[in-house]
Image (cartoon, rainbow, N blue to C red):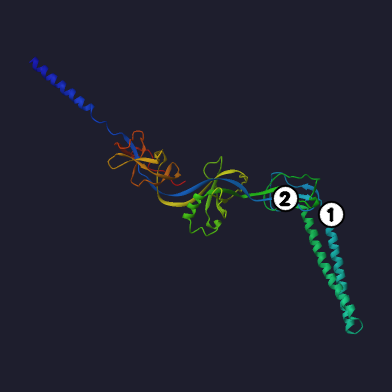
Amino acid sequence: MALSAKIVAGALAIATFSACSRGSNAPPPAPEVTVATPISQNVTDYLEFTGNTAPINSASLVARVEGYLEKVSFEDGSFVKKGDLLFTIQQDQYKAQLEQARAQVEAQEAAYRHASIELVRFTNLNKQKAAAQTVVDQWLYEKQKAAAGLASAKAQVEIAELNLSYTEVRAPFAGRMGRHLVNPGNLVGSAGQATTLAEIDQIDPIYVYFTISERDLLRILARRKDAAKRALKERDIPAYFALLNEEGWPHQGRLDFASINVTPTTGTLQLRGIFENSEMTVLPGLFVHVRVPIAERRDALLIPGDAVAFDQQGEYVLVVNARNIVERRAIKTGAQIAESLVIESGLRPGDRVIVEGLLQAIVGRAVTPVPAAAKGSGHDSHGGPA
């Protein structure tokens, strides 16, 4: 009996060892990966550029008449309205010239009236054979001469009024003043030379200039063939910009100008946008980021940006096929929408893209796909267009 028990125990041990040996040779379970299908939504394609701000109007204020500068009526860097008085040039001389011109008008009017009266008198006497025709002709000449002198005198009055008005330099438009370049007491406008007194910029609204590459220009023209024949401002193409320290695109405007030709040396075209600047916070000469929408795309496919990888062959993602085998899929990405990327080519709506567990996913091997929604990972929704 003891021998039989030992035999049974040995058999059990051998069976247990055999079972353990078979278990250690079994393949490990397929690793779990999180997958998500591309999201389909309407998005807008954008192009981004670097541009510079510029005033919508800029002028150098000059002295148009000669005289001593009497007064500066603004503070350097201040904002002025259209028509505000900025500089005053000595006026005494030009007021006297205006009075002299007006007096000359009165003298010519008197000469014209006298010649007219005499012409009528001698014309009547000539009809009565009491005056020679030569006398009538002489007074006709005097009347016409007086009329010409009167017209010349009136023109001199207008010139004198203009010169007097030039002694007051006013703002040609609402804007921001630079510093005054000439101090009171200095002679300006001498020897027929225009003396620059200050500069003024209109910065509400404000321009933003930027250049677009030939490749991007052709993309826009290909999608907007129907609008290419119209002026840029008539197409109402929106544009956005942000200063270097701003988040998002807080400044909205529109494109209003495009150069008439492409620069051959750089292959670029200059564009211009116009933007509201009522708070005067954007100054000319700043570098800004510009964003311009190209066209709206319907039913575009988006995937999380973290799912896209790069190698020497380009962009790709790992997908799980119908047999749960990992495949490498070459793709072409487009615009970034929040944390997602638009897929231009390489994916279909039902593809299962690996978004988590990429280190465990090896091309050609099986995996256990887990939908992202089931794990609550949030990769099944990527937000709306930026």
Q: In the displayed orientation, state which residue is furthest to the bottom.
A: 128
Q: Residue at x 60, y 43 (%)?
A: 286
> Badge 1 is on which residue?
93
Residue 74 placement, left or right of 126 = left
Nearer to me, 157 or 217: 217
Nearer to me, 375 or 42: 42
Q: Quick one: SS at disc 2?
A: strand
Q: Where is residue 329 drawn, in percent x and y?
A: 35, 42
Q: Where is residue 361 drawn, in percent x and y?
A: 33, 35
Q: Residue at x 70, y 50 (%)?
A: 60
> Badge 2 is on which residue?
61
Q: Quadrant of the N terminus?
A: top left
* Quarter of image, res 358: top left
Disc 1 residue crowd, few under 14, some 14–19, many 20+, Cα 10 Å: few
* Quarter of image, res 5: top left
Q: Where is residue 186 drawn, in percent x and y?
A: 80, 46
Number of marks present in the image shown: 2
Q: Residue at x 28, y 34 (%)?
A: 30
